Image (cartoon, helix red, strand yellow):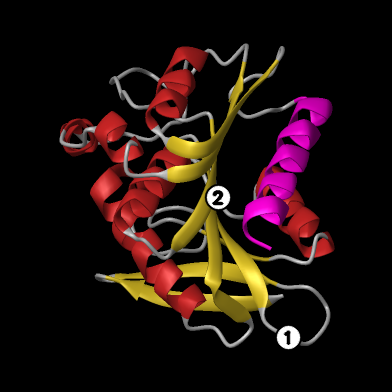
Amino acid sequence: MEQCEVRSGPYRIRGVFTRPDKSGRFPCVVLSHGLISSKDSSKFVSLAAAFETAGIASVRFDYQGCGESDGSIEETTLTGRIANLDAIAEWVFGHPSVDAAKVGLLGSSFGSVTSLVKAARDTRIRCVSLWATPYLLEKKDDNSGADFKDALYADFAQYDLLAEARKVSCALVIHGEADTVVPAREGKAIYEHVGRPKKFELIKGADHIFSVPGHRERAITLSVNWFRRFLV
């Protein structure tokens, strides 16, 4: 593993680069966590390990205001997170251990939206895996303790995410059937708008964060296989 740090505006964005334990240049997947999560969540640590086993490098990082990165989570906006992802992606494309022609994105929830927009606007991105992806954002009590500003919702509303989805192809869309945070119909709508090749997987009984180990392992396995097919 290698620590990485990039600048995104005034913020230092910190992450961890993991690659297979051998020499060479590897395909790489950039992992984007959700609104109030971090790179060190068990889900993303497990994803990095699974990709390493499959011969694929990965970068998991903290968006501004999360984990080890600078900033305040209350100041979060989708535009700001896209800028963070842009900065990390440039680091990835320039890394000597990465095959720059084989870079993909995997995001969960708000990180999935960020990955969707990035893929729509950057033709270098080969394929994506989108977990629990919303295209609507309503102000409500999420029990996170974070006092998000109105700017989060106003900024989000400026994006036509279904239109952005039309610019994306080679997408695996995964959703939990029992997701009460982002209804499965939102993930299905994203899937219907992305281009082929594409695949939709509804995991029966799974919640928003795939907290049940079997559900999480299913999502990880599906994603690793997707990237092995289209990235490697």
In this rendering, position of residue 214 left or right of residue 141: right
Query: What amino acid type should be assigned to the residue bearing mark 1?
Result: Gly
* Whether residue 31 is situated above or below residue 183 in the rendered picture: below
Q: Circle 2 sits in a helix, a strand or a loop, which is it?
A: loop
In this rendering, position of residue 84 left or right of residue 27: left
Residue 187 colored magenta?
Answer: no
* Whether residue 101 is situated above or below residue 37 in the rendered picture: below
Nearest the camera: 230 or 114? 230
Quick one: which residue is furthest to the front in this view? 196
Give the residue at x 18% y 39%: 155
Relative image position of residue 81 (x, y in whole percent):
34, 53
Query: What residue does disc 1 label?
Result: 24
Residue 226 colored magenta?
Answer: yes
Which callout, 2 or 1, points at the residue further toward the start of the chain? 1
Query: What residue does disc 2 label?
Result: 38
What segment carries the magenta color? 212-232
Q: Does any portion of residue 162 appear in the rendered image?
A: yes
Query: What amino acid type should be assigned to the residue bearing mark 2?
Result: Ser
* Whether residue 114 is situated above or below residue 85 in the rendered picture: above
| Quadrant of the frame with the C terminus | bottom right
Relative image position of residue 135 (x, y in whole percent):
34, 27
Give the residue at x 68% y 43%: 223
Give the residue at x 49% y 40%: 34
Q: Main secondary structure of the magenta part?
A: helix
Nearest the camera: 156 or 56? 56
Relative image position of residue 133 (x, y in whole percent):
46, 30
Give the residue at x 51% y 63%: 68
In this rendering, position of residue 208 left or right of residue 24: left
